[in-house]
Every structure is written in structure tokens, then in C-alpha cells.
Amino acid sequence: MDGRLIAQEIKDDIAETIRTGGAEVGFARPGLAVLQVGDSPQSQAYIHNLRTACTEVGIKSFASQLPETATLQAIIQALRTFNGDESVHGIVVQLPLPKKIRPETVLQEISLEKDVDGLHPLNLAKLALDDFQPSFVPCTSRACLELLTRYKFQVERRKVVVIGCSNVVGLPTALLLQRHNATVTIVDKHTPKPAEIARTADILVAATGNANLVRRNWIKPGAVVIDIGMNQVKDPSSEEGFRFVGDVCYEEAEKVATAITPVPGGVGPITIAMVLSNTLLAAQRRDHAKRKPL
Ligand SMILES: NC(=O)c1ccc[n+]([C@@H]2O[C@H](COP(=O)([O-])OP(=O)(O)OC[C@H]3O[C@@H](n4cnc5c(N)ncnc54)[C@H](OP(=O)(O)O)[C@@H]3O)[C@@H](O)[C@H]2O)c1
């Protein structure tokens, strides 16, 4: 499954909406702010890609980078500045944060209407509750659903196994697919016989951060495999001395799966497109609220 192609289609649609919306109704140009604490190269690369994508579609991007040693108060202050800034419609807090900072304490400071990553604890809780709609759905989880939908793989009544259960990726993906009437099982580090459970899946989603964890014998023949993992491994043959691989051993999986996402070029680019899509949505909602007659 080609994530880059899908991401490009989504970005083209967003760019067109922003271009025509601006020309026809004076719709304010959407703005996305990214808050980074520390300077890990992986975060830098993601933020660079995100800001480049913003420019591509016509979203203004803002960035604030605090040192690794920043206090919780300083981080919250930076977020409050973005919360109060009219030209910012969406806010992303780059994760992971330094170990001494609890992510939930920071994420709950984001205005709900600007929580375009959908990671505010209230938005995550609403994703889990039947009669509630979160303001935004987490972008990697949306990216998985988008892939399945665009490739016309049925989710409803399918058996899904999600391996890995973080608040940011695994859990919201399981919740989202369950909301779309899949029967979802979560496998975590403590689950006995993970390969046996994974092998029952029509749709297998891997999100653990362990290179090549999922081998051929974890995959039911004909299953659809979504590999969210993004793991840096040494590669002396590459210019940088490393490369990225997923949680799934691609060479083995492609022999048994109906379809699989590559790493890189699978879920990653669509995740970025989803951040842009949620930012556009945030701007449209604000614009709509302003236009409502009194
Ligand atoms: N492509 C994208 O757009 C995208 C976006 C975000 C993240 N990612 C990648 O996705 C992966 C997961 O990210 P994350 O933020 O969720 O990482 P994380 O916070 O480290 O969480 C990993 C989850 O997997 C569980 N786990 C670890 N080893 C396991 C095993 N052997 N079997 C089953 N479960 C296991 C962990 O359990 P414990 O909590 O008990 O350790 C945790 O629930 C990473 O490689 C990350 O780089 C990709």
C-alpha cells in the first residue's frame, strides 16, 4: 500500500480547499503550531517534514523549541501562548517529551478546539465512549483507517489485532477501528502467545517500536498488515549509516499478506497529511463559528 500516493492526494485536496476558500469567502489561512522540547534528530526530522507539508498546502506553520531542561511551567506557558494566538488553529506537541515530564499533564493544556493530534485526555476518552465525538481523532490512527478505506479493505466485522498499546498510537487505533465495528484484540508486552493471537487477524496493526518483531508465522495468509513502527537500525551500506524499518519483517510478510504498508512510505506520510487535514478542519470550524448569525 502506497502511503506517499495517498498522502499526496489528501494534500492536493487540502491545498485546493484552502486556495478556493481563501479566494471565495475570505476564509482565514489555517495555522499550525508545533512545540518541541529537546532536539532529538528524529523529532527534528518529523517537524521538518510537517512544516514542509504545511508550506506545500498553504498552512502557516509556527514553531517553538524549548531546551531538554525546560520546566513544566515553561512548557505550559508556551502552549498557553499558542492557545491564545488567533492565527494558530492547531497545536502539536512533539512526543516523546523528556522523561521527567508527564505527557498527559502537558497535553491536557491544549485547547480542545486546537488539539489537532487528538491526544488531549478528554478527546481520547471521548474516542472510547460510544455516544461522544472527540474534537479530533489521533492522526496516526486516522491514517490507518484512511489506508484501509482508500484501498477498500472492509473493517466492519473484521478481526483486527493491534500489537502495542500506547496512549498515542496503539490504543486510539484500536478504539477507532472498534468504532468502525471491527472486532479488536490488543496484544501488549505481557500478552502470552502473541504470534498465535496475531495469526487470527484479518487486519494486523503493529505499533511497538521493535524492529522486525512481527515475522511470517505471526501473519494469517491473506491478512492486511499495517506497520506503524518506525525503527532506526544500523546500515553501513547507506550514506547516513542507518535506515528505518518497521515492526514487521517486510520481506517475510509480503510473502503471506494480501497487502502491507512499507516503512518508510506507508503510514508516516499519511499521518502528516492527517495533521494538515485536522488543522484545516479546526480553521473551518472557527471560521464557521465566526460567521454564525447572532
Ligand atoms: N508512522 C507514523 O506515523 C508513526 C507515528 C507515531 C509513532 N510511530 C512509531 O510507532 C511505534 C510505536 O510508537 P509509540 O509512540 O506507540 O511507542 P511507545 O510509546 O514506545 O509504545 C509502544 C507500545 O508497544 C508496547 N510494546 C513494546 N514491546 C512490545 C512487544 N514486544 N509486544 C507487544 N507490545 C509491545 C509497549 O508496551 P509497554 O508500554 O508495556 O512498554 C507500548 O504499549 C514506534 O516505532 C514509533 O516510532 C510511527
Image: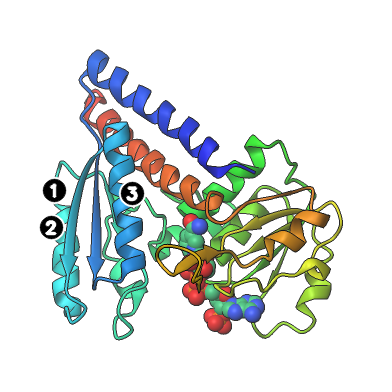
Q: Which residue is nearer to you in this view: 292 or 243?
A: 243
Name the amino acid type tagged 1.
Asp
List x then y, in percent, for residue 122: 41, 62
Name the amino acid type tagged 3.
Leu
Which residue is located at x 62 percent, y 68 percent? 247
Ligand 1's quadrant is: bottom right
Q: Residues within 10 Å of mark 1 (few under 14, many from 20)?
A: few
Residue 168 visible to an observer of this rendering: no
Looking at the image, is mark 2 or mark 3 earlier in the sequence? 3
The residue that disc 1 covers is 85
Mark 3: C-beta under 8 Å from nearest atom of ligand 1: no
In the visual, does 137 lie left or right of 63? right
Which residue is located at x 16 percent, y 70 percent? 66
Which residue is located at x 30 percent, y 71 percent? 40
Name the amino acid type tagged 2.
Thr
List x then y, in percent, for residue 152: 71, 36
Foreground mark, 1 or 3, reads 3
Label 2: which secondary element: helix
List x then y, in percent, for residue 184: 72, 61
Q: CA distance from mark 2 to mark 3?
A: 21 Å
The residue that disc 3 covers is 50
Labels 1 & 2 near each other (Cβ < 8 A) = yes
The residue that disc 2 covers is 81
Label 3: which secondary element: helix
